[in-house]
């Protein structure tokens, strides 16, 4: 015979009503209890002795009990593996044999809850406390279900308080009760409960997360970030159940930093513009900062005075959100300072592509081009996309290690800018991750280009985790990828260099990246103190820059024609023209031949001389990618054409 004994004072018939069973006539109380405990068996016997309910039911055979206990273990294992349907079947079988098995009922309710059936979860949890009124975990779960699913805060509070009356130092109960108090806007009580829970167990991540939510809700973002930082600074819990809270905590960290950065955006801009003066003094050139929402593939760009023969540095940025604007400007100022430092050490170099390097890049992906041709893609579209992709990869190759140097410097120098920097880098990371997770991009991109791009994105993710002292886990998506090893190699190159970094080392890093990624022939270098002539095999042909200079009057008119032709055109329309010319240039364009013998699909029913095409390409890139070094020396002709086009001289 199985006997279950429960004090009458502990029996909860209805949490919303206090019913004292001991005050009822004995016969009425027994009848009520028989119905209340009927889930155990239809043949139970009930008696009341000295204020205690005695429930008796028939005991199953020992063999059946042993089988049920084995089944219980199977149910626990199934639940741990996330197979909750199987777990439910096992636990139902257990309580069918051992109806008073409290742990089986509680685990059954948890499995039902995971399957989204809160009603059945409630039913079996209530049965748990009927059998064991001291089962604290069941009170915790009942409180959570009433708070989150039934939305009855009063009954939820009843169960939390009941659990705490039994175990007042249960930090998990305290946390959940604090969360309920916070929902009820009882912030002081919530704070007291959270702080008590933290004293009991300072390693529990939910408490830090709860306190950060509380301080965010009460308008104290600084304290909210303080508790999030404390959470991230302590060793990460190995309990898989805490995975979600870390994810939520990081989301809250980003959210609060964004709110902070937006709130103080104007002050951050003032702060950065103050430091801009220092950069102007150090470089000897004024810095003009311009909003330019025509930028599409980059968020901001710096045009160095010494590189573009200007009297000032120009920083152009695209307006994204107020939170990131201060960081975008600071990033470009730091780029100017980085290049200026290399100039002072006579180690500065200009990264450039030419017809020769572009031809090498296109040949590197020729197998993929052939594959796209077989699939029926139009030739002009293939050319446009391949030039865009290979050019984009070259830009990434140059910027990847340099951006790490720049961001590391900003992080060390400007504490005030931290919130804007974190939000800006988080956005860039998400944009890069999209490329990794988009199967269509992977299918259309040449494998060499794709793997190089993802490897550098992986290196950048590892850098972010390093910068943030592993509070983040940006590299996690890449860890199962075959490029993770390469990404780690790239990051380690930066990490090894940064401790003993000297101006100009950034260019050595670019070369090391290129060697690992097999991109050595995709670009070339030019020292900014030496004006080199184009290579004999570039698109300019067999002659050098002196012969181009001789054709400056014609080049002026061709550049003016290009400016007029491109006026009002979108970036895509201009890129279509310049990319087609660039593709044609890989086979050679004879600019010295005065005959009009060239045709391009993007400007139909028009014949061009070689010089006219090169001027079109030069001007187009000046409009859409002003920092790109095409290897063509049309600067004077273009400046004259630009002034005339804008009616500065006539």
Image (tube, rainbow, N blue to C red):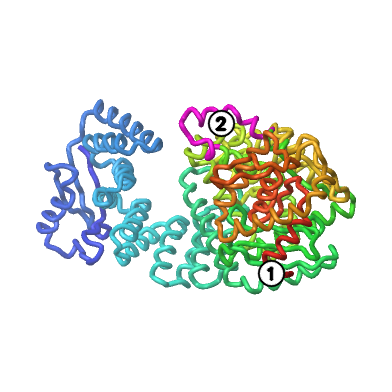
Dominant SS in magenta: helix
Q: Quadrant of the C terminus?
A: bottom right
Confirm whether the magenta stretch covers residue 377. yes
| Residue 525 shown left or right of residue 197 in the figure | right
Residue at 17% x, 37% y is 58
Residue 450 at x, y percent in the picture:
58, 36
Compared to 290, does 242 lie above or below? above
Q: Position of residue 479 (x, y in %)?
A: 58, 37
Which one is in front, 378 or 85? 378
Task: State the residue lying farthest toward the front.
Answer: 595
Q: Taking 95 as reference, is 531 left or right?
A: right
Q: Earlier in the sequence, mark 1 or mark 2?
A: 2
With 204 as the anchor, is 421 left or right in this view? right
Looking at the picture, how far across and down is residue 241, in whole percent?
46, 46
Residue at the spot x=58%, y=72% of the render?
A: 263
Instruction: Tell me where the magenta segment starts and ends, as one range.
Output: 360-382
Disc 1 designates what residue? 647
Q: SS of the residue at dot 1?
A: loop
159 vs 103: above or below: below
Label 2, on which residue?
369
Q: Residues within 10 Å of mark 2 (few under 14, many from 20)?
A: many
Q: Could you give the CA–CA distance between mark 1 and mark 2, rounded to whole angstroms?
A: 44 Å
Q: Is residue 503 above or below residue 181?
A: above
Q: Nearer the viewer, residue 378 or 609?
A: 609
Name the quadrant containing residue 510.
Answer: top right
SS at circle 2 = helix
The picture places residue 40, in percent across and down from the top left corner, at 19, 43
Name the one closer to the observer, 195 or 407.
407
Res 102 seen here: no
């Amino acid at each position: 015979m199985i006997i279950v004994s429960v004090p009458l004072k502990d029996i909860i018939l209805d949490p919303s009503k206090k019913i004292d069973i001991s005050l009822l006539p004995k016969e009425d109380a027994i009848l009520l209890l028989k119905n209340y405990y009927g889930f155990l068996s239809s043949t139970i016997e009930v008696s009341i002795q000295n204020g205690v309910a005695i429930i008796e039911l028939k005991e199953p055979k020992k063999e059946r009990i042993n089988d049920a206990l084995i089944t219980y273990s199977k149910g626990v294992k199934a639940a741990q593996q996330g197979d909750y349907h199987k777990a439910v079947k096992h636990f139902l079988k257990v309580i069918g044999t051992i109806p008073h098995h409290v742990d089986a009922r509680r685990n059954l309710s948890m499995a039902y809850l995971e399957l989204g059936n809160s009603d059945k979860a409630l039913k079996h949890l209530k049965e748990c406390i009927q059998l064991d009124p001291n089962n604290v975990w069941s009170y915790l779960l009942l409180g959570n279900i009433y708070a989150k699913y039934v939305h009855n805060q009063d009954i939820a509070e009843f169960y939390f308080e009941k659990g705490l009356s039994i175990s007042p130092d249960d930090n998990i109960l305290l946390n959940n009760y604090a969360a309920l108090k916070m929902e009820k806007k009882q912030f002081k009580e919530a704070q007291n409960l959270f702080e008590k829970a933290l004293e009991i167990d300072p390693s529990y991540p939910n408490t830090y997360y709860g306190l950060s939510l509380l301080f965010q809700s009460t308008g104290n973002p600084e304290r909210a970030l303080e508790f999030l930082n404390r959470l991230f600074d302590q060793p990460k819990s190995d309990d898989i159940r805490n995975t979600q809270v870390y994810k939520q905590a990081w989301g809250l960290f980003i959210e609060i930093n964004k709110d902070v950065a937006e709130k103080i955006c104007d002050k951050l801009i003032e702060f950065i513009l103050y430091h801009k003066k220092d950069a102007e003094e150090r470089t000897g050139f004024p810095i003009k900062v311009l909003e330019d929402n025509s930028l599409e593939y980059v968020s901001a760009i710096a045009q160095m005075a010494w590189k573009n023969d200007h009297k000032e540095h120009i920083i152009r940025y695209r307006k994204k959100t107020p939170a990131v604007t201060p960081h975008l400007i600071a990033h470009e100022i730091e780029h100017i300072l980085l290049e200026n430092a290399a100039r002072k050490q006579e180690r500065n170099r200009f990264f450039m592509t030419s017809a020769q390097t572009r031809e090498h890049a296109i040949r590197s992906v020729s197998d993929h081009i052939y594959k796209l041709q077989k699939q029926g893609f139009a030739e002009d579209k293939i050319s446009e996309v391949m030039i865009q992709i290979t050019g984009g990869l070259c830009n990434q190759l140059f910027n990847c290690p340099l951006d790490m140097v720049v961001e590391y410097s900003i992080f060390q120098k400007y504490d005030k800018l931290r919130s804007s920097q974190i939000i800006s880098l988080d956005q860039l990371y998400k944009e890069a991750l999209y490329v990794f997770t988009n199967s269509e991009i992977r299918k259309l991109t040449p494998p060499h280009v794709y793997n190089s791009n993802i490897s550098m994105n992986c290196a950048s993710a590892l850098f972010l985790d390093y910068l943030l002292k592993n509070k983040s886990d940006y590299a996690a998506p890449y860890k199962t990828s075959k490029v993770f090893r390469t990404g780690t190699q790239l990051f380690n190159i930066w990490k090894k260099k940064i401790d003993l970094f000297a101006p100009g080392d950034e260019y050595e890093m670019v070369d090391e990246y290129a060697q690992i990624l097999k991109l050595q022939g995709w670009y070339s270098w030019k020292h900014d103190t030496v004006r080199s002539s184009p290579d004999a095999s570039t698109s300019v042909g067999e002659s050098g820059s002196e012969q181009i200079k001789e054709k400056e009057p014609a080049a002026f008119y061709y550049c003016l024609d290009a400016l007029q032709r491109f006026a009002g055109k979108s970036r895509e329309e201009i890129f279509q023209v310049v990319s087609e010319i660039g593709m044609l240039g890989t086979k050679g364009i004879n600019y010295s031949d005065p005959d009009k013998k060239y045709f391009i699909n993007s400007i139909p029913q028009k014949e061009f001389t070689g010089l006219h095409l090169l001027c079109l390409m030069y001007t187009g890139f000046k409009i859409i990618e002003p920092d790109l070094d095409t290897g063509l020396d049309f600067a004077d002709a273009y400046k004259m054409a630009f002034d005339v086009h804008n009616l500065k001289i006539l």
